[in-house]
Amino acid sequence: MNILNFLSAPHMGVAELRGNLSGIIRGRKTVVATERGKPAEVVLSYDVFIQLLTQLQDLTDKRMAEVVNSGVKAIRSGSKGLPAGSSLKKHLKK
């Protein structure tokens, strides 16, 4: 599942979730558990959980933010920029 698709993940009540939990886990589905019709918890695969943690780590990494900001400034000033992969590897090694 694309981690950006949480809003479109199926919602189900806690009782229904209990009855389908093994199938949800085997199917590696993301499901929003609801209580009284309101989202309460999220069940997601370990892989999606790791992807989320990695993205959060990247978003909060000061060096990563500096690299991205310097690239944005360069592009705004007329530079064509560099491929992200090589630029990030170069700057993050510092």
Image (cartoon, rainbow, N blue to C red):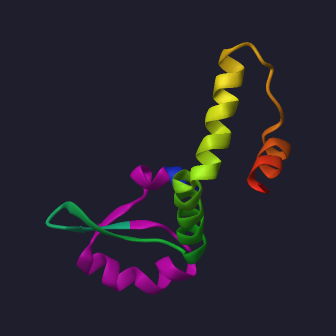
> Who is closer to the viewer here, 4 or 79?
79
User: Is residue 1 at all visible to an observer of this figure?
Assistant: no
Q: Residue at x 59, y 63 (%)?
A: 54
Q: Residue at x 51, y 69 (%)?
A: 29
Q: Residue at x 56, y 77 (%)?
A: 46
The x, y position of residue 76, in whole percent, is 65, 17
Drawn side of residue 57 relative to residue 14, left or right:
right
Q: Residue at x 71, y 21 (%)?
A: 75
Spot the residue most to the top: 78
The x, y position of residue 18, in whole percent, is 32, 84
The x, y position of residue 33, in whole percent, is 30, 69
Drawn side of residue 66 relative to residue 88, left or right:
left
| Picture quadrant of residue 42 | bottom left
Whether residue 5 is situated above or below residue 31 in the rendered picture: above
| Picture quadrant of residue 87 | top right
User: Is residue 7 at all visible to an observer of this figure?
Assistant: yes
Whether residue 69 is situated above or below residue 31 in the rendered picture: above
> Who is closer to the viewer here, 83 or 23?
83
Q: Residue 23 magenta-drawn?
A: yes
Q: Residue 73 magenta-drawn?
A: no
Spot the residue most to the front: 94
Instruction: Please state the extent of the stretch shown in magenta in the rendering.
Output: 5-31
